[in-house]
Image (cartoon, rainbow, N blue to C red):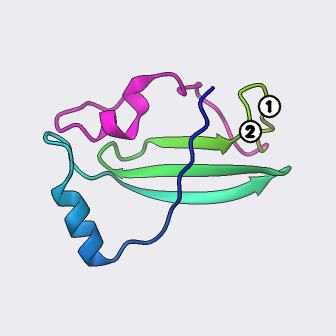
Amino acid sequence: YTTLFRSERQLTAREYVALVAQAAPGHRPIRKERHCFLHEGQYFELDSFLDPHPGLMLLEVEVESMEQPVKLPPFVEVVREVTSEPDFSNFSMARIGASTPK
């Protein structure tokens, strides 16, 4: 289990342009809508991909350890767990020419 620390904030247009210029060669920006919600004290992020891979939806839950049980909301239908599948990383999905992960 690796603990990742990240911060999120809105970017200015100037910052966005500067960061896109630094993007990895052969990759493109990912556009997605993120919906964040709490359920039974757990924080969830539901990403709906717009481009590339329109229609793909990924749910992420913030946990303190991999042993912590996840309590999914009753309205969530899980197709499968993809945490350890590298094809579902943002870096892989941003690769130009990458097909939608299966």
Q: Are marks 1 and 2 in contact (CB under 8 Å)?
A: yes
Q: Residue at x 21, y 50 (%)?
A: 23
Q: Residue at x 53, y 59 (%)?
A: 7
| Residue located beneath label 1 in the image | 68
Kind of residue at disc 2: Glu
**Magenta-tinted stretch:** 74-102
Q: Position of residue 66 (x, y in %)?
A: 71, 27
Q: Nearer the viewer, residue 75 or 82?
A: 82
Kind of residue at disc 1: Gln
Classify the position of the N terminus by image quarter.
top right
Q: Secondary structure at mark 2?
A: loop
Q: Is residue 36 left or right of residue 22?
A: right
Displayed quadrant of residue 101: top left
Q: Is residue 34 left or right of residue 49?
A: right
Q: Residue at x 79, y 43 (%)?
A: 74
Q: Is residue 67 left or right of residue 61?
A: right
Badge count? 2
Nearer to us: label 1 or label 2: 2
| Residue located beneath label 2 in the image | 64
- Callout 2 environment at 10 Å: few (<14), some (14 to 19), or many (20+)? few
Q: Position of residue 9 (x, y in %)?
A: 48, 68
Q: Secondary structure at mark 1?
A: loop
